[in-house]
Image: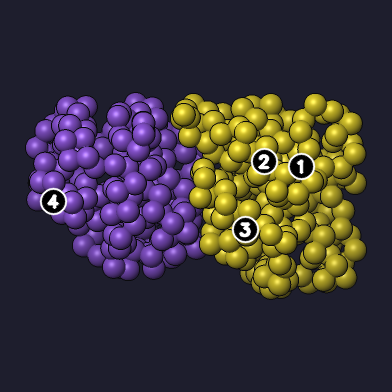
Chain colours: A yellow, B purple
Amino acid sequence: MKQTILCLDMEWVLTPEIWEEVSKNTGIKELMLTTKDIADYDELMNYRKLHMNNNWLTLSKIQEVISTIDLLPWAIDFMNWAKDNMQVVILSDTFIEFAKPLLKKMWNPTIFCHNLIIEDNKIVDYKLRIKDQKTEAVKRFKELNFNVIAAWDSFNDTGMLNEANFWFFFKPGKKATDAFPNIPVAQSYEELKTFIEKSL
Amino acid sequence: MKQTILCLDMEWVLTPEIWEEVSKNTGIKELMLTTKDIADYDELMNYRKLHMNNNWLTLSKIQEVISTIDLLPWAIDFMNWAKDNMQVVILSDTFIEFAKPLLKKMWNPTIFCHNLIIEDNKIVDYKLRIKDQKTEAVKRFKELNFNVIAAWDSFNDTGMLNEANFWFFFKPGKKATDAFPNIPVAQSYEELKTFIEKSL
């Protein structure tokens, strides 16, 4: 009868990808790039900063765009179900300044994420809260005697996923399922709920 | 620019005291006793079990009573403000089976608490998630590089309170303020908000 913490990624699992939406909305194509294109995160962020600044893209403008993004269909129902039945913590490598307008649409669930460094409404840098925060969080939850379930779209966060008591793919790409053929794959919230219920 | 987790007690800070309300509502006076009357928690719980069973008080009946309890006035506004500005985790020694109807009234914030062991709708025992769970949780949050603020009504949880980066009394008794004369005392959510804002 261990209590459960469900750890979820925010983007792709509950919301669209933020940078992609910002890119589409502002027409700055360079912001479409992800770690799939530039593997080194710091290099990618420097590239993004360069193109935001070249285009005079302020934090307020980005937040304005983000606040127009809808949650994924049925995400709110899934979250309500999950919060009724266990604890839920979003573990995301996004920045709190970006996540806020989206979190508000789900009554602000708990999120562990990072920070942007802002000067005069301009994104000048970012600050990771701690290195490998997702793995560290899952470890700590387990130390607090929680059963930790993780639902993820990719396998980038292998450290964290291996640490969890149970993990499931949510609408993963082929690369992910090829790499981890034994991990259960949920293509919908209904399927994910079934997996989770069996792991409580 | 550390991110903050605000740790709150549930009863007294956000909701009335559950056992007190159950006692008043069911007329079972023995359920009014707290650790102030029987210091040993296990002894107190055995006493409560005895009197619940003597009075055929089922879990469903207790949950029915709890679901009629209102949050404290303005608690929801305080929670909304807090969740807009930081992460909030309720650390409580209540049981999830009791807390649920009250949590639902605040859109299910994250809570770390304990479990009851139920057989045939009867409370036969309880299970602490881990020993000294509040201190352990605050320690873990700090390890995850959060600034931890705690707002509490009493000083029973000294271990936890000393561990937090900042702590404040919320409507404490005289015994608490006598024991810790240097801890800031908030008599209202507005005052508490002022203290918290200065500690972000």
Q: Chain of mark 3?
A: A
The answer to whether dots 2 and 1 both sit on one chain is yes
Q: Secondary structure at mark 3?
A: helix
| Residue holding disc 4 | B27
Where residue B102 sits: x, y (%)? 37, 55
User: Which amino acid is tagged 1?
Assistant: Ala
Amino acid carrying label 3: it is: Asp
| Badge 2 element | helix
Q: Residues within 10 Å of mark 4 (few under 14, many from 20)?
A: few
Q: Is residue A54 above or below residue A168?
A: below
The residue indicated by pointer 3 is: A77
Q: Is residue A153 above or below residue A116?
A: above
- Where on the picture, by quarter, is residue B129? top left
Whole-number angstrom distance, CA of label 4 to CA of label 3:
39 Å
Label 1 chain ID: A
Name the chain letter of the residue that bears numbered label 4. B
Task: Say which mark, if any, is on residue A194.
Answer: 2
Q: Residue at x 81, y 57 (%)?
A: A48
Mark toward the viewer: 4 or 3:
4
User: Disc 2 and disc 4: Cα gap in Å?
Assistant: 42 Å
**Amino acid of disc 2:** Thr
Query: Who comes first in sequence, dot 2 or dot 1?
Result: 1
Foreground mark, 2 or 3?
Answer: 2
Determine which residue is flagged by label 1: A186
Q: How many residues crowd around disc 2 within 10 Å: few (fewer than 14), some, or many (20 or more)?
A: few
Residue at 47% x, 48% y is B110
Q: Quadrant of residue A134?
A: top right
The reply to whether residue B72 is visible in this rendering is yes
Residue at (39, 42) in percent of width and height: B96
C-alpha gap between disc 2 and disc 3: 15 Å
